[in-house]
Image (cartoon, grey):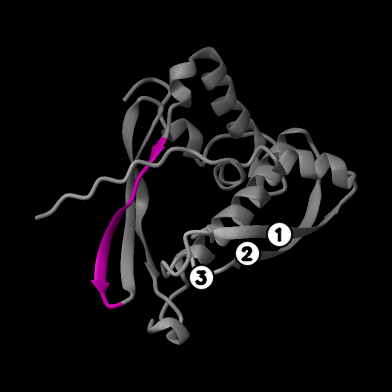
């Protein structure tokens, strides 16, 4: 592992001001390291998914790549996905599209909090409501005219802060997941039999 390892990002001994629960000195150190060496900005997040039968599948997240080396979470995370009983699922877990909404609002929130924290903007609370509209005729293959995914997503964030709404919204717009959802990107799908 190189000298700018992830331990520098997660060291509990790191001292610095804490704003909104974020150790800003630690975050600024990571940003500074990346400014000095752009190769440290290359991260890769991964998961392994296994079909559990019927409408259920499980994803495992434990390995990732950052700062030029392989990393591991402190513990393995698992997420199950299912479908509602109304469409032949077992309703044992959120749907994949609900995870997309969760990822979107979680990333918007964390992004806003991180950017506000390093700028010294205090945030008292954040509560959000997210809605995604989908016409399932596309998913079920009933119409080539209908998109398979969401055709509209609305996020309403209620934020308690001295900062104005325009500033806070601008900070949230640095969100990686917002960029993924709002802008198309190439996704390669390879199916291997075996």
Q: Disc number at residue 91?
A: none
Q: Say few, some or many: other residues with alpha carbon within 10 Å of mark 3 (under 14 / 14 to 19 / 20 or more).
A: some
Please give the residue where the numbered disc 2 appears in the rendered image: 132
Measured in 3D between alpha carbons, the distance from the residue under mark 2 to the one under mark 1, in whole angstroms, is 6 Å
Asked whether 144 or 34 is in front, the reply is 144
Q: Say few, some or many: other residues with alpha carbon within 10 Å of mark 2 (under 14 / 14 to 19 / 20 or more).
A: some
Q: Secondary structure at mark 1?
A: strand
Q: Disc number at residue 154?
A: 1
Earlier in the chain: of badge 1 and badge 3, it is 3
Q: Position of residue 160 (x, y in %)?
A: 84, 56
Q: Position of residue 118 (x, y in %)?
A: 71, 34
Q: Disc number at residue 136?
A: 3
Range covered by the magenta-colored residues: 44-54
Is residue 58 depicted above or below 62 in this figure?
below
Q: Secondary structure at mark 2?
A: strand
Measured in 3D between alpha carbons, the distance from the residue under mark 3 to the one under mark 2, in whole angstroms, is 12 Å
Q: Nearer the viewer, mark 1 or mark 3?
A: 3
Q: Position of residue 42 (x, y in %)?
A: 43, 27
Which residue is rendered at x = 66% and y = 35% of the image? Answer: 24
Which residue is rendered at x = 25% and y = 63% of the image? Answer: 50
Magenta run includes residue 53? yes
Q: Is residue 123 left or right of residue 174?
A: right
């Amino acid at each position: 592992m190189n000298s700018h390892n992830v331990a520098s990002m997660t060291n509990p001994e790191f001292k610095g001001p804490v704003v909104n629960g974020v150790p800003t000195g630690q975050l600024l150190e990571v940003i500074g390291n990346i400014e000095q060496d752009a190769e440290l900005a290359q991260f890769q997040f991964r998961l392994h998914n296994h079909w559990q039968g019927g409408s259920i599948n499980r994803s495992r997240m434990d390995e990732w790549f950052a700062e030029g080396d392989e990393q591991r979470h402190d513990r393995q995370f698992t997420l199950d996905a299912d479908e509602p009983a109304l469409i032949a699922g077992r309703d044992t877990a959120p749907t994949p599209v609900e995870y997309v909404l969760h990822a979107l609002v979680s990333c918007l929130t964390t992004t806003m909090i991180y950017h506000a924290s390093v700028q010294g903007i205090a945030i008292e609370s954040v509560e959000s409501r997210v809605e995604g509209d989908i016409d399932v005729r596309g998913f079920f293959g009933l119409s080539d005219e209908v998109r398979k995914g969401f055709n509209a997503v609305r996020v309403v964030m209620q934020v308690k802060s001295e900062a104005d709404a325009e500033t806070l919204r601008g900070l949230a717009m640095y969100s990686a997941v917002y960029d993924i959802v709002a802008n198309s990107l190439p996704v390669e799908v390879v199916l291997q039999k075996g």
